[in-house]
């Protein structure tokens, strides 16, 4: 291999050197030449930027070597297509992965700068909503760490998920201007731009061989410009690429319009093109049929597929082998229009015949489902879809025609089945069912936890399971222990490493070795001390930012996730009110002091979720100001929960709230992050909770509530929430306290919609699960009093959580779905040579 590092110029020290003196010089150099500042006039952000560039320089050699290696060896490559990548801050992660954390910390200290302060400066790229986007980020980390050739393809939203403020207890959304101060981690590649078509019509023609073709004549063309971010694995040389697409107008001016004097018209057209990647839709687990959203999906999918085809050409590979070269994972149905777009590219632009194109397509895609909630399944109205993508509509019709023929042969005389399975929903206004297209167009279909994958086969995708049983599989989610243990909880990581060495970081099952120390009282003390110190850190943060003092000796009970009725933050709220009522009734009651912490954003259009936030803040207001509650109960809603803040929160939890209605949470991933950091879980038998309980041991997990099956039975039997309200005095009192206006300055109407929903529908069975939850919470309070036993339970959670490393998930995908191999990147040593 030819070295791509110029060896005739002396770049070693300034750009790649890693001793303290070199790092300091490089930092000052970047401050001067990139930020154009000298220390005296530098802001914190200038220092952050100078450091970010210093670190980026030290990534580039690995990144370019990786790119070159992949280009030369042309290995089978994973393309992870996701409308969301919720990466979190890059600087700390890159320092850790490069092994430069400590030396850089020292270098900064010698300038009188605190590294933690600089890390705080980074505005995280919030290019995702919640679990689904963060999962993509964890998988990108594991792919690089496992040295798997992979590309993450997505959208470079100019505005990511909104920033949340709380005003008078209500959520207020602020636009996320994450690019305001520039993004040092991305490299724009305007030379690699591509064109994407929209709208218009199709025309048929016959070529010189008498073959029939279709041509798409678009109404408009938009340019896609890739922005690349290196994703370095943990202590490897492999740095994969996250390639995010930005939409731009084809030319900066429409000269024709300009010449006609329509200056504003031409500028407007430009801004309409750029609208496509302007903003992330802030809904999680519910979709809205917005045309711009569909255009976002097609835009990034088309760019990505064209990019893959272009790469194969550059490597002199024939497109006949597309499916051998790429395994494309569809992260939910959001990129599923890729099935039709790959067909179009092969048919119309590369003259494949249908069967050949379909064979390639269906050997390329694999589909991950993330939800069973019917309101979250994407469907696009035929009219809307056809107006933006007339050619794709034809292709989808043809796919459906052939598919239904197949169904007819396998299941003769079953008209209902045909109607149920059709890619086109014809029951009223006609819709395209994207999950059906994904199932038909993919060779593998997976859910994200065992229960979820089983329920998919039994319910939502039952017909597809009967049609294609061999396509179905499960890959239980996982999370990266690098970001969520090593980086976010260095105290715990150091203690673990001191005991069992450091190989657990890439082989998380090794945490099992901690079980040997379960009755080692010194270890238990140290483990407890780590938790106390981390809780103290969070308490300090809360005192500084909220002016509320919380006691690190109280039980930190945390529910941090998007706000949704099925996640049941309001069930947690009902328990707080119950405790409050008990103490009011008996001020001398001996209670285990608790601090209830909530964090999470509500979709801006989701009224009920916003009302839940208001309820929590209203309860907090009353509880925190009631002298009877002092030193016993505190309630805090932490605003603007994001990845950066999550890294502070997981380490400090004693108790993790995973209380969704059984059968509704596909997996959950926060549950894993809490448990990894030694929190015990109070949870239902839902999503990955079941598997977490299985591995940590049922005696180390607080279980309550109905099972998924019981939930269905109860509903079928005619569930009536009033029965629970009328027969449970504590529940009645809690609800009555809200409806009386006790938490709303006497206003009985404020929370009425929420209470009506509970009493008249209660589709998530809060009232049915209330008693079981209360009793379980009381057991938690008891258990926390025996601190030594609690610590052992906590240690066992950490020791047995190995299964939930995203490395394991990625190995599952690699072996069972993608069939790709690792390719180690070699980086020639050059930093000593000066010839
Ligand atoms: O994906 C979540 C699931 O709720 C959770 O159980 C699972 O652990 C996680 C990872 O598999 N789903 C999720 O986060 N979904 C979204 O964020 C989302 C975003 C957009 C849309 C739908 C869902 N949309 O239709 O626009």
Image (tube, rainbow, N blue to C red):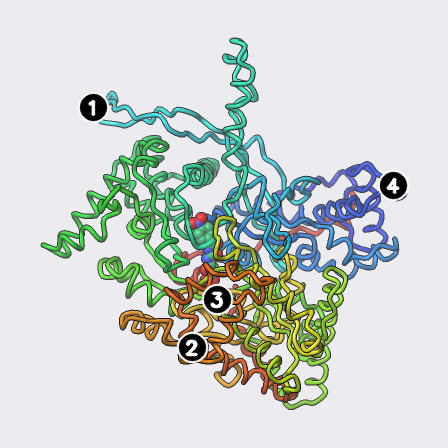
Q: Earlier in the sequence, mark 1 or mark 2?
A: 1
Q: Earlier in the sequence, mark 1 or mark 4?
A: 4
Answer above or below: position of 45 versus 262: below
The N terminus sits in image quarter = top right
How far separated are the C-alphas under marks 1 and 4?
Answer: 72 Å
Q: Earlier in the sequence, mark 4 or mark 3?
A: 4
Q: Are marks 1 and 2 in contact (CB under 8 Å)?
A: no
User: Where does the image place residue 504, in percent across and percent down from the top left?
Assistant: 61, 72
- The numbered disc on residue 41 is 4
How far separated are the C-alphas under marks 4 and 2?
Answer: 59 Å
User: Where does the image place residue 109, in percent across and percent down from the top left?
Assistant: 85, 57
Kindly indicate the quadrant of the structure image that contains residue 762: bottom left
Q: Mark 3 vs ligand 1: CB under 8 Å?
A: no
- The numbered disc on residue 568 is 3
How far separated are the C-alphas under marks 1 and 2?
Answer: 67 Å
How far separated are the C-alphas under marks 3 and 2?
Answer: 12 Å
Kindly indicate the quadrant of the structure image that contains residue 36: top right
The C terminus sits in image quarter = top right
In this image, 77 relative to 555: left or right?
left
Q: Which residue is mark 1?
A: 210
């Amino acid at each position: 291999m030819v070295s791509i590092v110029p060896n005739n110029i002396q770049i070693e020290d300034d750009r790649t050197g890693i001793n303290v003196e070199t790092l300091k010089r490089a930092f000052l150099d970047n401050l001067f030449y990139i930020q154009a500042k000298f220390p005296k006039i530098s802001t914190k952000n200038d220092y952050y930027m100078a450091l970010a560039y210093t670190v980026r320089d030290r990534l580039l050699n690995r990144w370019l070597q990786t790119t070159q290696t992949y280009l030369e060896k042309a290995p089978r490559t994973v393309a992870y297509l996701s409308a969301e990548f919720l990466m979190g801050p890059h600087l700390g992660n890159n320092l850790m992965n490069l092994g430069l954390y400590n030396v850089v910390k020292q270098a900064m200290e010698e300038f009188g700068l605190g590294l933690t302060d600089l890390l705080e400066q980074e505005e995280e790229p919030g290019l995702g909503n919640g679990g689904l986007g963060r999962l993509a980020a964890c998988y990108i980390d594991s792919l690089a760490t496992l040295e798997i050739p992979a590309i993450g393809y997505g959208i470079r939203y100019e505005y990511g998920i909104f920033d949340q403020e709380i005003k008078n207890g209500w959520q207020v959304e602020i636009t996320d201007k994450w690019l305001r101060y520039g993004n040092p981690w991305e490299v724009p590649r305007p030379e690699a731009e591509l064109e994407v078509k929209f709208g218009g019509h199709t025309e048929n023609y016959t070529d010189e061989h008498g073959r029939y073709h279709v041509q798409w004549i678009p109404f408009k063309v938009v340019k896609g410009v890739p922005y690349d971010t290196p994703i370095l694995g943990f202590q490897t040389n492999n740095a994969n690429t996250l390639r995010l697409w930005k939409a731009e107008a084809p030319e900066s001016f429409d000269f024709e319009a300009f010449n006609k004097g329509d200056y504003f018209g031409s500028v407007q057209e430009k801004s309409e093109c750029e609208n496509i990647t302007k903003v992330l839709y802030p809904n999680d687990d519910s979709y809205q049929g917005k045309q711009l959203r569909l255009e976002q999906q097609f835009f990034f999918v088309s760019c990505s597929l064209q990019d893959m085809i272009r790469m194969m050409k550059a490597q002199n590979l024939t497109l006949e082998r597309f499916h051998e070269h790429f395994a494309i994972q569809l992260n939910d149905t959001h990129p599923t229009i890729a099935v039709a777009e790959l067909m179009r590219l092969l048919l119309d632009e590369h003259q494949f015949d249908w069967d050949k194109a379909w064979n390639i397509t269906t050997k390329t895609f694999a589909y991950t489902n993330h939800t069973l909630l019917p309101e979250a399944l994407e469907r696009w109205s035929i009219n809307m879809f056809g107006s933006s993508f007339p050619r794709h509509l034809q292709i989808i019709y043809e796919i459906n025609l052939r598919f239904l023929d197949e169904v007819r042969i396998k299941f003769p005389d079953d008209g209902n089945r045909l109607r149920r399975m059709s890619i086109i929903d014809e029951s009223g206004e006609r819709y395209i069912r994207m999950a059906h297209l994904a199932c038909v167009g993919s060779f593998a279909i997976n859910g994200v936890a065992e229960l979820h994958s089983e329920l998919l086969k039994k319910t939502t995708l039952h017909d597809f399971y009967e049609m294609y049983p061999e396509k179905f599989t499960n890959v239980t989610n996982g999370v990266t222990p690098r970001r969520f243990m090593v980086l976010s909880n260095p105290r715990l990581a150091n203690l673990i490493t001191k005991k069992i060495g450091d190989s657990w970081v890439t082989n998380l099952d090794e945490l099992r070795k901690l079980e040997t120390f379960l009755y080692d009282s010194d270890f238990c003390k140290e483990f407890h001390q780590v938790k106390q110190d981390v809780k103290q850190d969070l308490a300090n943060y809360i005192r500084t930012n909220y002016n509320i003092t919380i006691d690190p000796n109280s039980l930190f009970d945390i529910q941090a996730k998007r706000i949704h009725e099925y996640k049941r933050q309001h069930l947690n709220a009902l328990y707080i009110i119950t405790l409050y009522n008990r103490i009011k009734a008996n001020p001398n009651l001996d209670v285990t002091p608790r601090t209830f912490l909530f964090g999470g954003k509500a979709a801006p259009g989701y009224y009920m979720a916003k009302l839940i936030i208001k309820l929590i803040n209203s309860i907090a207001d009353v509880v925190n100001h009631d002298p009877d509650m002092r030193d016993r109960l505190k309630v805090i809603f932490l605003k603007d929960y994001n990845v950066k803040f999550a890294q502070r929160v997981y380490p400090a939890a004693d108790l993790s709230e995973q209380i969704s209605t059984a059968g509704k949470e596909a997996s959950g991933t926060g549950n894993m992050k809490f448990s990894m950091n030694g929190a015990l879980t109070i949870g239902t038998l839902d999503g990955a909770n079941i598997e977490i309980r299985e591995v940590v041991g049922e005696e180390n997990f607080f279980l309550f509530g109905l099972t998924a099956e019981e939930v269905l039975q109860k509903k079928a039997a005619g569930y009536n929430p009033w029965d629970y309200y009328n027969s449970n005095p504590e529940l009645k009192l809690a609800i009555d306290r809200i409806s009386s206006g006790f938490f709303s300055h006497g206003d009985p109407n404020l929370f009425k919609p929420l209470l009506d929903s509970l009493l008249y529908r209660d589709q998530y069975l809060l009232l049915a699960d209330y008693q079981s939850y209360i009793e379980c919470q009381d057991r938690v309070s008891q258990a926390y009093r025996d601190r030594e036993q609690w610590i052992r339970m906590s240690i066992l959670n950490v020791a047995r959580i190995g299964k939930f490393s995203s490395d394991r998930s990625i190995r599952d995908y690699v072996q069972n779905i993608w069939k790709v191999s690792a390719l180690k990147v070699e980086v020639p040593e050059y930093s000593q040579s000066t010839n």
